[in-house]
Structures are given as C-alpha cells and as structure tokens.
Amino acid sequence: MSHGNMNLTLKIWRQNSGKEQGQLVTYPVKDISPDMSFLEMFDVLNEQLVSKNENPIVFDHDCREGICGMCSMVINGRAHGPKTGITTCQLHMRSFKDGDTIVVEPWRAQAFPVIKDLTVDRTAFERIQSKGGFVSVNTGTAQDANCLPIPKDDADASFNAAACIGCGACVATCKNASAMLFVAAKVSQFALLPQGKIEATARVKNMVAQMDLEGFGSCTNTGACEIECPKGISLENIARMNREYLVANCKD
C-alpha cells in the first residue's frame, strides 16, 4: 500500500428491487487514495466487482460537481455523509481514517421507494414541482433590471431558496420523512418575486396537496433538514410557505 492510502470496510445496502428484501453486504476496499471522492471510491469497488463477474452496486450520479443532487447516499447515518454543506460527490475519502468501517444506505422514505441498491425513485419531487413550481406568464424579453424594482433582501432570499437542488437529503434526514423544506424552497423562490404573485394562491395549495398525496410526513421542527441540506436552505422558507398557505386558504 502506498503511503497515506487507506484500507476500508464498506457495509453497503444491496436490494434487487423495491419488492424484495435488502441487506447490508460487507466489501473490503484497499489502497484507497484520500484524494478520491466518495463516488470515485465506489467506481473502484464496482470495477473490482465487475472483474469478478459480480453485480456492481447501483447508485445515482451525474454531474459530480454538487449541482444535480443525484448522488443520494446515507453514509454512517447522515445524508451525504459526515460533512455539512456538500453532496456525496463532494465528499472526499480524507474525511475517513485508515481501517474505518463505513455504512452506506439509500434514502429511507415511503415516498422514495427503492429501485435498486442505493437508487431510489424521487419522481415524487417532480410531481410536486409540476403542480406549481413554475410561472406560466408570458414574460417576453427579459426586462432591464431597473425596470422591475425588487428589494435586495427579497431578491437574495429568493435566490437562496432557488439554490435547492432537489436531492432529498431533507426527507432522508427527517424522522417523519417530511418534504417541507424542499416544497418551501420551491414556493419561496416565487413568493418573494413579482412574477410569482399571479399564481401564488394556486401554487402553494396545489404543491402542498401533492406533497401530502405523495405520503411525505409532517414537519418535525427539529431543523435536521437545514443542517443536512447541501445548499443550506433555511427553515425560514418553511415559515414563509406556511404563511403563503394560510393566506391562500383565507382567500377561499
């Protein structure tokens, strides 16, 4: 083993489909560079499995730059692993020590059924988004910024809410598997801007109704979602969504 590299024991959740029972399977990995990302380490393991004619571990990934939100893994009990403010693909092996045992599981939520191994079906988020996470006004050519005055605090808060990448870490870390932080971010990014006012009433009511229909749990107010969110989406967005929902129902 070259200097500084690690030998690790991985306990990884294997499950052929959502209809079958799964289990943790132990895999030793050797000579892992501390500069590898967590997903690169998985690539090495999968190459080893394929070379032995074993089925590789199925996991989601795409951009590997912390943008797409697909790299959903619960690592040693924490969504996206032991660091804060990052996705799994941004986690490096130097966050672990030689000889460590690392337990890797999928997102655990009724509304996120397992497809295979570490991959879960998160289309519930897409169905919620399709119910109102958009503006349908014909905006035409983009206006000059000075023609549509928006308080900077509102613009900044909207931008921060829009940073949500829909990874589902908030759901995976909530003891009730609540999607409130995700939905609140998608409501807030429009609620704060003039373009979102036109459909504000229908948006929040439809998105909350779809969230409940998908089987997500109630908000626990423990704040675990904000802590594990790789983009640091604030709990303030949940308060804003609750206000928007109350106002929308008062208009009936």
Image (cartoon, grey):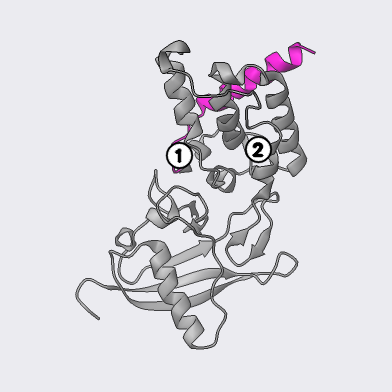
- Magenta part of the protein: which range? 230-252
Q: Nearer the viewer, residue 70 or 199?
A: 199
Under circle 1, the secondary element is: helix
Residue type indicated by callout 1: Ile
Please tell me in which quadrant of the rendered image residue 21 appears.
bottom right
Report the side of 115 relative to 143 (left or right).
right
Question: Which element carries disc 2, helix, strand or loop?
Answer: helix
Question: At x 44% / y 69%, what residue is drawn?
Answer: 42
The picture places residue 232, in percent across and down from the top left corner, at 44, 36
Task: Tell me what residue is drawn at x 69 percent, y 56 percent.
Answer: 113
Q: Position of residue 18 (x, y in %)?
A: 71, 64
Residue 43 numbered tag = none
Label 2 sits on residue: 129
Magenta includes 245? yes
Instruction: Check the image and name the residue furthest to the front.
Output: 141
Give coordinates of residue 182: x percent, y percent.
58, 37
- Image quarter for residue 218? top right
Distance from disc 1 to disc 2, alpha carbons, whole Å, reads: 23 Å
x and y, in percent, of residue 246 in the image: 69, 17
| For the residues bearing labels 1 and 2, Cβ distance under 8 angstroms | no
The overriding secondary structure of the stretch rendered in magenta is helix
In the rendered view, would you say 227 is above or below 58? above
The residue sitting at 57% across, 46% down in the picture is 168
Residue in the image at 43% along x and 71% along y: 43
Query: Is 27 positioned to the left or the right of 240 in the image?
Result: left
Compared to residue 40, the image places residue 232 above or below, namely above
- Locate the N terminus and report the quarter of the image it occupies: bottom left
Q: Nearer the viewer, residue 77 or 49?
A: 49
- Looking at the rendered image, the quarter that the C terminus falls into is top right
Judge whether 79 appears above or below 41 on screen. Answer: above
* Disc 1: which residue: 227
Q: What type is the residue that disc 2 sits on?
A: Gln
